[in-house]
Amino acid sequence: MAKVKMPTPEDISGMWQASGLKEKLIFTFLIIAVFRLGAQIPIFGIDSEAFKSLAGGTNIIGFIDMFTGGALGKVSVFALGIGPYITASIIMQLIAVVIPPLEKLQKEEGDAGRRKISQYTRYLTLGLALFQSLVLILFIYRQTGTAIILPDLNPILVFAGALICLTAGAILVMWFAELITERGLGNGGSLLIFVGILSQIPVYMKSTAAIVAGNPPMQLALVILLSIFLATILFIVVMQEAIRKIIVVNAKRQVGNKVYGGVNTHIPFKLNPGGVMPIIFAIAILLFPATVLDIMGKEQGMLSTIATFVNTEIFSPAKLPYYVIYFLLIFSLTFFYASIMPNMQPKEIANNLKKHGSSIPGVKPGKPTADLLDKILSRTTFIGAIGLGLIALIPMVASALTGITSLQGIGATSLIIMVGVALDFINQIKTHLLVRQYEGFLK
């Protein structure tokens, strides 16, 4: 497992001297500041306080609001956040596996192909942003009618303006993410989600303080809960950095008087290839029926009774069936995501090794190599799926047992995103510092 070395004071002081690093950091922080400013600008005509009371009992709204940094709860111009862009990127990854022309663009066309894929992703983001904006507006109208519109305003004009603002805001956030990725530090989309989650921590702290104030047993429970969260973070770091290395022997080639190759390398198989995506998919799958059943439960008749029973006994986070379904979904989705990763296809890896004259020691090229890689990949993914499922359950179970539910927003998804983005950000800074050292050596 690779060790993560935190920057030393000398690294931090030399950070500003590294080639281009200062400009990248300043640019990244400026984009983040603009993003957070936009998250505070409300859409004209909609009563944000009325929407907060509406969203308080809706699971899916609260979940999305966590990733937007409270922008959805304020009904701001950035209420959809980076969600449409992330969803579009995931969809493009999935369909590129089953549509040959897209797969060819991704694998064989190089930078030109990737630029076309990016352009298609932007078009899909626009469509998803428009669709999600319309769904949000219809949901608000379905629940409240025009009661959420400020007095003396035309509801049609307000909803039309909200549709335009929400869609434009999502496109602008997508642009921010791409700017950070190209000119700043880190992955723009992940960094904006990280900032959104981080901005909600004071809200969780305030709610938790109100629960434990003047209550020694609850204060002890909080200490235990925070210790569990810390242990979970350490477990996440292990999961994110752990890899299985497969030794590869490269063939020697002689060109003139020089000999090339012959150096042993390795194929890295990550223990958690899907990162946080299996958890996000699992939560989305669970929240959708729960939200539909919650809406149906507010109607009248036998269907309402059944919907309420199913929602409270199966899809309630306080019930055992919910934990079992959640774990099984994460376990299955981890395998699914590993199967579509372009760099984790045993047959393609075996063919590439054979093409370049490389091999795994003691294993024949071709099908035997592919079978071995498939067996190793299945084992590592199995361990990773079990670990990811446990990581997802630990914060939820700990919050339920201690009775401190105000920190449930900082669940496994938030912790994995924050740890992953922080590690990536630190690694990019270290890369720039290393470049600076090489520049000094060459001088």
Image (spheres, rainbow, N blue to C red):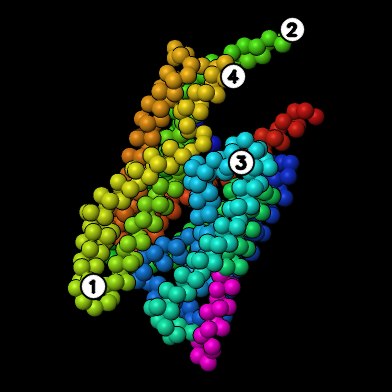
Q: CA distance from mark 2 to mark 1?
A: 82 Å
What whole-number distance in Å separates the C-alpha atoms at marks 3 and 1?
Answer: 49 Å
Q: Secondary structure at mark 3?
A: helix
Q: Which residue type does callout 4 highlight?
A: His
The residue where tag 1 is placed is 304
Task: Return the residue at label 4.
Answer: 356
Task: Residue lying at the far right in this picture: please name it.
Answer: 443
Secondary structure at badge 2 equals loop
Q: Are marks 2 and 1 in contact (CB under 8 Å)?
A: no
The earlier-in-sequence mark between 2 and 1 is 2
* Image position, residue 107 (x, y; %): 59, 36
Residue type, numbered disc 3: Leu
Residue corresponding to mark 3: 105
Residue depicted at 67% across the width and 40% down the height? 111
Q: Is residue 155 magenta?
A: yes
Q: Earlier in the sequence, mark 2 or mark 4?
A: 2
For label 1, the SS is: helix
For the residues labelled 1 and 4, the Cα–Cα distance comes to: 63 Å
